[in-house]
Amino acid sequence: MSYAIVRNEKLTRAEINGKGTHNDRKAKNHSNKDIDPTRTHLNYYIKKNEFTYTKEFDKYIKENNLKGHLRSNSIIMCQMIFTSDQAFFDKIGEKETKRYFDECYKFICNYKNLGEKNIISAVVHLDEGAPHMHLMFVPVVHAKDIEGNKIDKICARDFWKGRDSYRKLQDAYFNHVKSKGFDLERGMFVEDTNRKHYTIEEYKKITNYENTKKVLNDIKLDLPNVPEISDIGKFTLKRDEKILNEIIKPKDDLIKELYKDNLSLHKELTKQSKIIDEAQKYQKEKNSIIAYNQELHNTVKNLEYEYKEKKKTLEHEFEDKSFNLEWQYKNKIHKLEKENIHLKKVIDKFKETTKKFIKWICKKFDLPSEDEVIRDFEKETHTFLDAEKQVKHEKHLENEYGLDR
C-alpha cells in the first residue's frame, strides 16, 4: 500500500537560496546523481518565483505590512515536500498525478488559513526519483495585537505551535487527499515507528539502490595471491612445521573456503538481480494496465458526477419553473376573484337600481303594483328580471330544444 507523504523543513535566510538552486535546477553540474537532465524539461511550476528565494522574500516583506522581529537566525520560510512512492504514480497515470499535486497545493493554501499570497514557489519534479513537489511558503499567522487589532506576522514557532503540530498536518493532509479520491494510506506515527524523519537528500544517501548493480558488477572474484604451503615450507625449518600446520595451513584453507562462498553468493545475487529485472518489467506493464483502468474508473466517476450535477440543475430548473407557474396561476386566480367580487357588487347594484326604476315607473305613470308589472313583463317577453333565473331558463331551453339564445 502506498502512503500519503508530506514533510516540512524550517529554513533560515542563509539556507533558503541553497534550496532554490536545487528546486529551480540552476546548478550546471548536479551533485545529485539521481537527477536525469534529459527529463528536467518535464518539471513544471504551479506557482513560479521570479527571483531567488531571498530576493522574493525581500520583495514579499516590502509589499506586505507584516509584523514580527526577524533576526539573522530566524526561520523565514518553510519547505514542504509532497510525494508518495513510484508505484502509486505509475498506477494513477500522468493526468491524475497532476491533479494530485494540484490538490496538495490547494491544501496548503487553505491550511491554517495561510493564503496563496504567502506561497513563494511550488515546483513539481519529474526528473528525480518518484514525482514530488517542493513548496516554499512564509509561515504567516493571523493574530491580534495588544489593542485587539487584526495583524499578520511571520512566526514559524506559532505556525507550528504544539508538540503534535506535525501530527495534525499529517492528519489534515491525509484526509484532504483521501476525500479527493486518491487511494492512499496515512503514514504511521513517529511514536509508533521510532524512526527519524530524513530530508530527500538524506534518504538518497541512505538508500543507494542505484549503485547496487554497479557494485555487484565490480566485485572481483579472483582468488588472492596466497603463497602455497610447499613454497613456505622451503623457507622454514622442520621445527616450524607446527606453525605451518596449526596457523598457516588453516588460514589458507579458510581463504579458499571463503572464496567458494563468495562465488556462491555472487551467483545467487546475479540470479536474484535477473529475477528483480524481470519482476520490474512485469510490474511496469501491470502498473500501466492499472493506470489505464484507473483512468477509465476516473472517467466513469467524472461522468457520474456530471450526471448528478446535470440532474441537480434540471431539478432546480423544474422547481423554479413550477414555482413561477404556480405563482402565475395564483396571481391570475387572485385577479379573477377580485373581478368576481367587483362584478357581484355591480350586479347587486344593478338589481337595486332596477327595483327603484320599476317602482318609479309605477308611481310616475300610475301603473298597477310592481309585482304585476314585473309579472306582465316576464310573461310577454319570456325574460326574467332575476339574472340567475334567466341563466337557468336559457340553459334549460338549450338542453331541451337546442336553442342558443
Image (cartoon, rainbow, N blue to C red):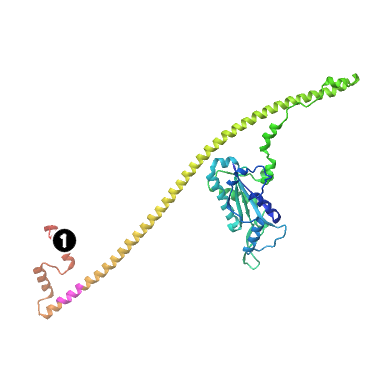
Q: Is residue 378 left or right of residue 17?
A: left
229 relative to 310, above or below: above
Amino acid type of the residue tagged 1 in the rendering: Lys
Where the C terminus falls, by quadrant? Answer: bottom left
The region drawn magenta spans: 350-358
Q: Position of residue 368 (x, y in %)?
A: 9, 76
Q: Is residue 354 left or right of residue 180?
A: left
Where residue 389 appears, as percent x and y from the top left, is 16, 65
Residue 302 visible in image: yes
Q: Is residue 353 magenta?
A: yes
- Tell me if residue 367 comes above or below residue 249 in the rendering: below
Q: Nearer the viewer, residue 341 or 77?
A: 77
Seen from the viewer's position, the closer of residues 231 and 76 is 231
Question: Which residue is identified by label 1?
Answer: 395
Number of numbered labels in the structure image: 1
Query: Residue at (64%, 61%) from the top-left corner?
Result: 59
Q: Is 256 placed above or below 178 here?
A: above
Query: In the picture shown, does residue 326 fall above or below 294?
Result: below
Please state which of residues 325 and 151 is positioned toward the viewer in this rendering.
Answer: 151
Instruction: Identify the residue at image location x=54%, y=42%.
Output: 93
| Residue 148, picture quadrant | bottom right
Rendered location of residue 147, percent (x, y): 64, 68
Residue 122 counted in the magenta span: no
Residue at image point 50% right, 42% down: 295
